[in-house]
Amino acid sequence: MMVNIPDKMKAIIKEKPGRGAKLVTVDVPKDLGSHDVLVKVYATSICGTDLHIYLWNKWAQEHIRPPQTMGHEFAGEVVAVGEEVSMVQIGDFVSSETHIPCGKCKQCRTGNMHVCQHLKILGVDMDGAFAEYIRVPEIVLWKNDPSIEHVWASVQEPLGNAVHTIFVEDVTGKNVLVTGAGPIGLLAIEVLKTAGVAKLIVSEVNSYRRELAKSIGADVVVNPLQESLVDVVKRETDGDGADVLIEMSGNEKALIDGLTSLTPAGRASLLGVYDDDVMINLNDLVIFKAIRIYGITGRKMFDTWYRVGDLLKNKKLDLSKVITHVLDFEDYEEGFHLMEEGKCGKIVLKL
Ligand code: NAD
Ligand code: ZN
């Protein structure tokens, strides 16, 4: 069933290899498979992955086949459903997991859909959310509580990265170190504030983001280019070191300093993605310290989404400081420039 849907729409696409993105008019993807849903996008936030596609870095060159609509973090309204769709209805306020699992492989069948062997990614392997409408398979749709505002609902996917990274083990009453206060690190600070941590130490090289980290609620903010992170963490934890490392910089030095700052038998969760192979002294930093390291990819489906949705629905999180810019869809270039300069937290485009 379909009502009042135009044939054409605005979309921000990666038109061709090289730097940039273009606002164009394309067809609305009305041809729905039996399990597909058409969503009218209200708000869509810019991810570091979108910036990589915009800048056309090595990863983008290897993964993106232009022309393709960018974007994957969004909130919107269901406007049409395929014949077999039963999870959502026209009019529902929804967001979506970005990772589309096959539902059939060993991982999918054993509670590990987020590492499906045949994962497809919205806005990477198929057209994305920087458009007035997006077609999404129902398996990844998430129904939002209607009380959540559109802009906040649109950042649940990266917020889910933070929630997944933080809560793989208990954090309550612990000394926590977050390395890297980019958009996801800043979301992590907001989440950690709700979790009753004893002390929250944040390390960040960018001064704009250090200020933001402080104003969101970090207890101690460190510039690792000016002071020794290891010394500060020791000092702030009575010489013991941090109980938990939340690594969100993707920087080798931050990782090594973070692991060095951990107390023996501590826990590290690594979300950051590194440009190159990383050399660490496993004996000294991990094995003889009996450290537990978790590699974190995406969100647990859908455990993470229930947590994120409930935190927002019950107004336990305040995203007003983390979301530093809400721009008109047409002003996407400004968003990419702000991200390139690092003078932002999370940026959302409104349609
Ligand atoms: P981002 O690159 O915007 O943020 C990283 C931050 O780390 C920046 O603010 C940067 O200034 C800071 N930083 C760099 N070097 C540092 C150092 N030595 N010490 C302290 N801070 C330092 O990225 P983001 O969007 O916030 O994402 C965080 C990380 O998580 C990135 O590496 C990203 O690629 C990765 N990521 C992973 C997944 C996953 O599923 N594993 C998903 C999304 C993002
Ligand atoms: Zn699978």
Image (cartoon, rainbow, N blue to C red):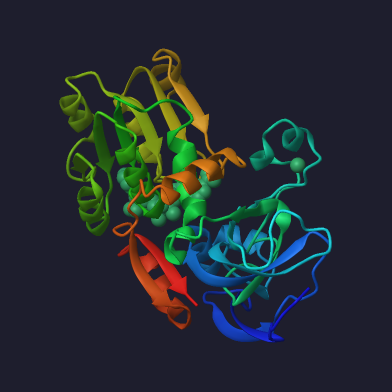
Whether residue 275 is visible: no
Give above or below for 260 relative to 334: above
Horizontally, residue 41 falls left or right of residue 207, namely right
Give above or below for 105 relative to 185: above
Dividing the picture into quadrants, the one containing residue 289 is top left
Q: Residue at x 34, y 69 (%)?
A: 325
Residue 228 spot, x, y in % from top left: 20, 35
- The total of numbered circles placed on residues is 0
Closest to the observer: 164 or 240?
164
Give above or below for 214 relative to 270: below
Whether residue 88 is visible: yes
Q: Residue at x 72, y 64 (%)?
A: 37
Residue 102 spot, x, y in % from top left: 77, 46
Closest to the observer: 68 or 85?
85
Screen quadrant of the N terminus: bottom right
Q: Residue at x 33, y 27 (%)?
A: 172
Residue 66 spot, x, y in % from top left: 67, 73
Horizontally, residue 29 falls left or right of residue 311, namely right
Residue 317 spot, x, y in % from top left: 35, 48
Q: Residue at x 76, y 34 (%)?
A: 109
